[in-house]
Amino acid sequence: MSDETTLAAGASGSAYFKAPVFAVAPMIDWTDRHYRFLARQLSKHALLYTEMIVSEAILRGDRERLLGLDDTEQPVALQLGGNDPGKMAEAARIGEDFGYAEINMNVGCPSDRVQSGTFGACLMREPAVVADCVAAMKAAVSIPVTVKCRIGVDDQEPEVALRDLVSQVTEAGTDAVWVHARKAWLQGLSPKENRDIPPLDYGLVHRLKSENPHLFIGLNGGLGSLNQALEELNQQTEVERDAGGLHTFPHPALDGVMLGRTAYHDSAMLTAVDQYFSHPLTGASAIDLSAEAFTANGHRQSLAFWAGVRDAMMAHAARHIASGGRLIHVTRHMVGLFQGWPGARRFRQILSADATRAGAGPEVIAAAFDAVLSAAEAKQAAE
């Protein structure tokens, strides 16, 4: 991928982030501040997202607990859930004051809780409401306002539903649309099943980009590796057959890719991101990692790099414990590191067993890393 970056202009004429963008998807209970701190140690260029936070909670709840942000996590986008333009605008304004780099509206979550509040994926049926919320938030903040959506819900025809939503939010001034390329079935499938069972339609997202060349369009859903994400990001050629024969339709490159559970369960994959993607805010070029050794899973092998990650996580854990938190709040996000590495099983055992004990401190992180780094060092010496 070229180190050159282009500026993707939002529909309102304002600029979104410098494309192409790699993002880690917002995930409830997972992409909290501790996971984001870990992810930032692994990639300086990935765009990170909060968990979805309901606008009403921000207006009435403990804002520091909900929105507290460490500057070292940046760039971070705040994802909001809701359907009231006034409340969404006020929550967005508060989020901007906390320092977030983007406000994203959730139009894709299919959970029962979200359905009962008539927001999330339910809003695929109410594109005018989404557009009103986008317009209100755009008027309230100076940072980008974006939408993350599905391609449709239930019996909707995706070719119609997605285009209708995108048309209306584009008119309202959205700076970007991130598309989870699956339908959501609001009745009959659980949130987990909605991540796997409805078929993917990447072709529709590529067609959407062809029809909206000046709008930032990012792809989410079913991307199982960085290599697959890079392939889908690039220009695609669609082939159709009719009575007249075969016809090819080239589609331009997408502007971004977003990985969720793949990036969480195998977080070390993030160590390869910066060699392909520039920094979304500064435009700093992708980093030359050609001299680095990588594992078969695409993890950086440099033991000095991983020692730095260890030290950063220990310091972060110490600060969290000193403020009244527990070690497990931090380490629960680290268990998926080092898949395929020698010593990885012992690493997981130490974090799973010792981090939950009363009084557990950063020394547990040190012991877990030592199990991997000493085994990796011995393996490298023997090769």
Image (tube, rainbow, N blue to C red):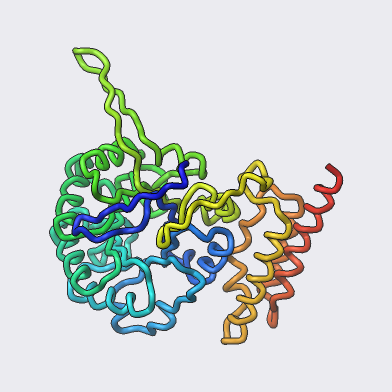
Residue at image point 69% right, 78% down: 361
- How many numbered dots are placed on residues in this image? 0
Q: Left of 338 or right of it: where is 248?
A: left
In the displayed structure image, the side of residue 141 where residue 98 appears, left or right: right
Q: Is residue 91 above or below residue 17?
A: below
Q: Relative to 332, is 246 above or below? A: above
Which residue is the extreme one toward the right? Answer: 382
Residue placed furthest toward the bottom? 323
Which residue does the image show at 31% across and 56% down from the upper left? 148
Does residue 201 appear in this view? no
Q: Quadrant of the C terminus?
A: top right
Snapshot quadrant of residue 39 = bottom right
Residue 107 position, x and y percent, is: 27, 58
Whether residue 2 is visible, yes or no, is yes
Q: Position of residue 175 (x, y in %)?
A: 26, 58
Q: Position of residue 167 (x, y in %)?
A: 16, 50
Which residue is found at the position 25% from the left and 38% from the top? 210
**Residue at horizontal 58 percent and vertical 49 percent from the top:** 288
- In which quarter of the view is residue 143 placed? bottom left
Question: Which residue, as the protein is rendered here, is positioned at the far top?
Answer: 244
Q: 92 or 197, which is in the foreground?
A: 92
Q: Quarter of the image holding residue 373?
A: bottom right
In this rendered view, identify the residue nearer to me: 257 or 322. 257
Q: Position of residue 30 (x, y in %)?
A: 49, 64
Seen in the image, is 15 located left or right of residue 71?
A: left
